Image (cartoon, grey):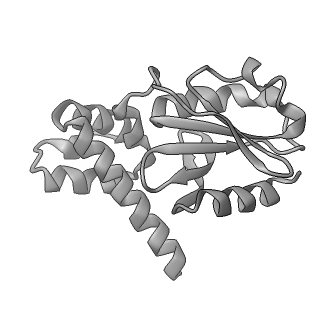
Amino acid sequence: MKNKEMRNRLMKHLNIKVLQDLNVMHNTIDLVSLDDLTAYEIISNNYSLKNLSLKVIYNSMIFKRNYVVICEKDKEQITNYIPSHWGIICIGLKIEIIREPSRNTDYHFEHSLNILTKEDLVQLCKEKEIQGYSKYRKPHLVKYISSLVDQERIESYVIQKLNENRNEKEVS
């Protein structure tokens, strides 16, 4: 099955707002839920499971919950390529949730700030009246903000910005 067909069926099945093809830390995430920080990686017939390792590392750091979305042909071997905290969705004649994601011990809210642009980070600093942010480049700004702003506020802000980005793309 092709990526586009799997993507369309999954989005219809999930019935949630998503952002497609989000680029973060040299990685493109196929779908990101705009309700929470859940990523969906689609493994179509044209994709080798061996190429999944970097996506697993990046996504596990950035997103609270992760799913891999596979075709029937990968059902037996997928658990060899993903950690036990990743969920598995299989798309065949029907859509089957094989495993729900569990607590992701690799996730750290600091890394979710990498989803944002430097401009978004500066705006967060202004909103929270954080001083001294202008001297930092993005990687250091991420660390600086995460040391001063609580996890819940950061996650909420990231979701807010993802929703704004989606809305801007729909208008243009």
| Drawn side of residue 79 relative to residue 65, left or right | right
Residue at image x 33%, y 40%?
A: 137
Residue 20: where, in percent of width, then height?
61, 58
In this view of the protein, which residue sits in the foreground, 125 or 156? 156
In this view of the protein, which residue sits in the foreground, 116 or 50? 50
| Drawn side of residue 137 relative to residue 39, left or right | left
| Drawn side of residue 96 relative to residue 25, left or right | right
Which quarter of the picture shows residue 45?
top right
Residue at image x 42%, y 54%?
A: 35
Q: How many marks?
A: 0
In this view of the protein, which residue sits in the foreground, 50 or 2? 2
Q: Is residue 163 above or below residue 21?
A: below
Which quarter of the picture shows residue 73?
top right
**Residue lying at the far bottom of the rendered structure:** 171
Residue at image x 73%, y 21%?
A: 79
Residue 95: where, in percent of width, then height?
75, 49
Residue 165: where, in percent of width, then height?
45, 65
Q: Is residue 112 above or below residue 170?
A: above
Residue 122: where, in percent of width, then height?
25, 52
Residue at image x 44%, y 46%?
A: 115
